[in-house]
């Protein structure tokens, strides 16, 4: 996760410079098949390039720098194969969720080609070799322990947080001009932030929005991130909400914060998450949040969000109507802001710094 890497490097430099000299390494992505005429835009050349970079180029890069630093931090578990090229006893991995390993852990429930399963096992073995594995929620830790994937003594809880842009007020006044990229998002609107992956349950999002529009025809849905699947496009057309859905991609954080602050309600109907960063971002902006009733989102949202059963369109539609009709149905703004304030990138960085200090001490104990 790019945000986690950026925030960690920033806090380590600002708050732990007396103990760490931090380098944020990001090897260049090398294009091969995607440069070929006529084929570059297709899925298979893109997949080929990603595989070659992850399995060949990035490990070579890691091997070249393995002697230049005392400890290494892999900020995203999907790159844990790098541990094979790094000194494992001095390397940690942040495990955001177990999605990247599902094909290896449950081949029947998550059928994938043999090569994909082999890759998932290779990446998982890299994470298992690491000296420390960080996780953002206790729910993910319980999943790891239940499957016996990592020695519990290696696990360290380091929750994520909202970036500095996610605050309950605009920096340039109470009623600023809308950033150009979000001007199509006319109020009132419901907001969803995240990919269009199956686990995000975009089908529930669209159905709940269509129900809400029957009573509030002026309502819009603003979707930030991802690319619609064919099934989702078909559902949008079938529901007749094409003209009322605004799809935005690649927003900067300030523009996204502007949307959070103006959303009538932020919806997060996922059936599985590792943390649910948009929940804490929305709360930090003072926005009301309706999320799926799953352990991870309960852990993050606490008493500052409201919850609906996973996949229950009727319950989601009723909850949306209740929130739109009575703003007091949501926890108070003060409760939302207080909950968000319990998550801090400074605490995140301090936790990770302490873990690497323990590793350094264990490898180089003080001499008498």
Image (cartoon, helix red, strand yellow):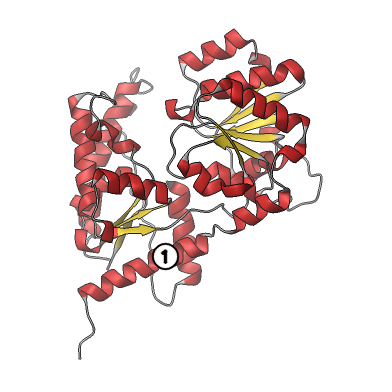
| Image position of 225 with respect to 2: above or below | above
Q: Residues within 10 Å of mark 1 (few under 14, many from 20)?
A: some
Q: Nearer the viewer, residue 237 or 38?
A: 237
Looking at the image, which is closer to me, 180 or 218? 218
Residue 338 appears in which quarter of the rendering?
A: bottom right
Image point (50%, 69%), residue name: 14
Q: Is residue 322 visible?
A: yes
Q: Is residue 187 visible?
A: no
SS of the residue under disc 1: helix
Residue 212 image point, x, y percent: 69, 21
Residue 195 in percent (x, y) is at: 49, 31
Seen at 52% across and 24% down, the residue is: 202
The percent position of residue 43, horizontal first and vertical second, equals 34, 22
Classify 349 as above or below 32.
Answer: below
Q: Is residue 198 left or right of residue 67?
A: right
Image label count: 1
Q: Residue at x 23, y 36 (%)?
A: 120
**Quadrant of residue 179 within the rendered picture:** top right
Residue drawn at 70 percent across, 43 percent down: 261
Residue extending farthest to the bottom is: 368
Decide if residue 17 is on the left or right side of residue 320.
left
Residue 151 % position (x, y)? 23, 55
Can you name the residue that lies furthest to the top here?
238
Q: Is residue 186 above or below residue 254?
A: above
The C terminus lies in quadrant? bottom left
Q: Is residue 357 left or right of residue 281?
A: left
Which residue lies under the disc numbered 1? 351
User: Foreground: 5 or 107?
Assistant: 107
Question: In the image, is 109 to the left or to the right of 323?
Answer: left
């Amino acid at each position: 996760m790019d945000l986690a890497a950026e925030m960690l490097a920033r806090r380590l430099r600002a708050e732990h410079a007396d103990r760490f000299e931090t380098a944020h390494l990001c090897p260049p992505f090398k294009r091969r098949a995607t440069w070929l005429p006529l084929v570059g835009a297709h899925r298979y050349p893109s997949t080929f390039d990603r595989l070659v970079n992850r399995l060949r180029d990035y490990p070579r890069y890691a091997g070249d720098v393995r002697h230049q630093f005392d400890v290494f931090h892999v900020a995203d578990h999907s790159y844990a194969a790098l541990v094979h090229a790094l000194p494992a006893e001095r390397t940690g991995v942040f495990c955001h969720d177990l999605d990247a390993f599902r094909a290896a852990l449950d081949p029947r429930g998550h059928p994938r080609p043999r090569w994909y399963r082999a890759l998932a096992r290779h990446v998982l073995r890299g994470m298992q070799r690491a000296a420390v594995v960080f996780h953002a929620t206790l729910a993910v830790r319980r999943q790891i322990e239940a499957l016996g994937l990592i020695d519990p003594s290696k696990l360290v809880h380091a929750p994520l947080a909202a970036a500095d842009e996610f605050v309950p007020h605009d920096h340039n006044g109470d009623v600023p001009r809308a950033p150009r990229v979000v001007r199509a998002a006319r109020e009132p609107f419901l907001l969803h932030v995240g990919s269009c992956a199956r686990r995000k349950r975009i089908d529930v999002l669209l159905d709940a929005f269509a129900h809400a529009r029957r009573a509030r025809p002026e309502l819009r849905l603003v979707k930030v991130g991802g690319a619609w699947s064919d099934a989702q496009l078909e559902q949008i057309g079938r529901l007749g909400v094409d003209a009322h859905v605004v799809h935005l991609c690649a927003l900067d954080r300030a523009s996204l914060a502007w949307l959070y602050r103006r959303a009538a309600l932020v919806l997060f109907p996922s059936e599985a998450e590792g943390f649910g960063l948009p929940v804490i971002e929305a709360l930090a902006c003072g926005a009301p949040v309706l999320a799926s009733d799953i352990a991870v989102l309960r852990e993050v949202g606490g008493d500052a969000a409201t919850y609906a059963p996973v996949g229950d369109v009727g319950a989601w539609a009723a909850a949306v109507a209740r929130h739109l009709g009575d703003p007091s149905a949501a926890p108070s703004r003060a409760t939302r802001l207080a909950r968000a304030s319990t998550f801090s990138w400074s605490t995140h960085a301090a936790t990770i710094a302490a873990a690497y200090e323990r590793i350094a001490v264990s490898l180089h104990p003080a001499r008498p």
